[in-house]
Image (cartoon, grey):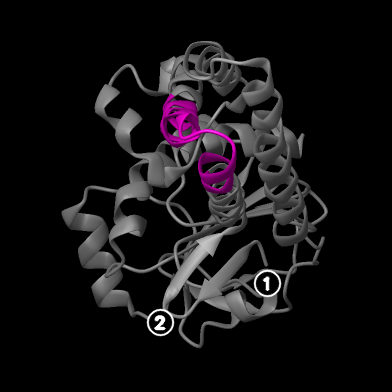
């Protein structure tokens, strides 16, 4: 769900769609460079890299309140977060400056259109989220009684699947802990995968993390229920328990806020 496994490499649906669209675009412009004009070589590089950089910049500026205390996080492109409308001026400027004739500019529309079509189609096919109900599982908790995951309490929920040995899990945990404080109307469940009480308690103490509802999924049944691959995974659930979104990989603070807003 929302992921593509390529051997040992696991890509989220969004990242797979981006790579597929860019790959088709580069192949198309390569053909144009050999058959129409060599100027398409430079043009395609500027559009691909300049467009991605502009889209990332647009995302950062749009969500600046989440970046102002750590502006270097703008370089953390593996977290995702792109405003693709910001790539349009780069594409137009590159067409005007680098392509000299109307014929070249007309041909340039073909790889742009095909790349965008592949991108959109791949994203729709891979990122579709099935509104699965919560699993009928009862998990032991770090503090307090066991928790029945199928018992909803009228609030939307965020479930994070994580482990202490996972670097992306460790990096995203402070953002999730802060979101837990900022959204008391949302139920947060931090479900550890395959580890025990001593390891998790030591990690939380060393990292000075105060998390509510830390649960243990020693048999890793939750990812099997939701058909997710790898960790970290952050699941966003409607108030009735139905799955709204599954985010594969490290999640950024602004993405947490955006997905929670969509649950209301």
Q: Secondary structure at mark 2?
A: loop
Residue shown at the point (72%, 75%) measured from the top left? 135
Q: Is residue 96 left or right of residue 61?
A: right
**Residue 150 at what x, y percent from top left?**
74, 69
Q: How many marks?
A: 2
Residue shown at the point (56%, 77%) measured from the top left? 139
Quarter holding the C terminus is top right
Q: Residues within 10 Å of mark 2 (few under 14, many from 20)?
A: some
Q: Nearer the viewer, residue 78 or 207?
A: 78
Q: Quadrant of residue 175?
A: top left
For residue 32: magenta? yes
**Tags 2 and 1 touching, CB below 8 Å:** no
Q: Which mark is residue 194?
A: 2
Q: Secondary structure at mark 1?
A: helix
Residue shown at the point (54%, 37%) measured from the top left? 255
Q: Which mark is residue 226?
A: 1
Identify the main secondary structure in magenta. helix
User: Along the polypeptide, which appears first: circle 2 or circle 1?
Assistant: 2
**Residue 104 at what x, y percent from top left?**
62, 25
Q: Is residue 99 left or right of residue 124?
A: left
Q: Can residue 59 be seen by looking at this rendering?
A: yes
Residue extent of the magenta highlight: 30-53
**Residue 69 at what x, y percent from top left?**
28, 20
Q: Residues within 10 Å of mark 1 (few under 14, many from 20)?
A: some
Query: What distance separates the C-alpha of mark 2 from that of mark 1?
Result: 17 Å
For discs 2 and 1, the disc positioned in front in the rendered view: 1
Quarter holding the N terminus is bottom right
Q: Is residue 44 left or right of residue 198?
A: right
For residue 153: magenta? no
């Amino acid at each position: 769900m929302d992921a593509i496994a390529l051997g040992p490499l696991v890509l989220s649906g969004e990242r797979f769609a981006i790579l597929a669209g860019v790959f088709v675009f580069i192949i198309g412009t390569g053909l144009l460079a050999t058959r129409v004009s060599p100027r398409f070589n430079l043009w395609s590089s500027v559009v691909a890299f300049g467009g991605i950089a502009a889209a990332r910049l647009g995302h950062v500026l749009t969500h600046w309140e989440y970046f102002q205390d750590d502006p270097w996080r703008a370089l953390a492109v593996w977290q995702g977060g792109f405003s693709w409308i910001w790539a349009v001026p780069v594409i137009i400027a590159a067409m005007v400056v680098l392509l000299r004739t109307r014929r070249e500019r007309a041909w340039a529309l073909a790889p742009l259109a095909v790349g965008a079509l592949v991108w959109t189609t791949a994203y729709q096919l891979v990122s579709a989220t099935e509104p699965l109900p919560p699993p009928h599982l009862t998990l032991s908790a770090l503090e307090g009684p066991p928790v029945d995951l199928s018992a909803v309490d009228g609030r939307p929920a965020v479930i994070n699947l994580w482990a202490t040995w996972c670097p992306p899990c460790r990096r995203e945990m402070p953002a999730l802990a802060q979101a837990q404080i900022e959204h008391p109307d949302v139920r947060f469940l931090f479900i550890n995968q395959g580890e025990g009480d001593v390891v998790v308690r030591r990690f939380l103490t060393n990292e000075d993390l105060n998390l509510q509802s830390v649960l243990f999924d020693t048999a890793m049944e939750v990812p099997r229920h939701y058909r997710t691959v790898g960790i970290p995974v952050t699941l966003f659930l409607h108030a009735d328990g139905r799955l709204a979104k599954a985010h594969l990989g490290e999640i950024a603070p602004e993405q947490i806020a955006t997905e929670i807003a969509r649950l209301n």
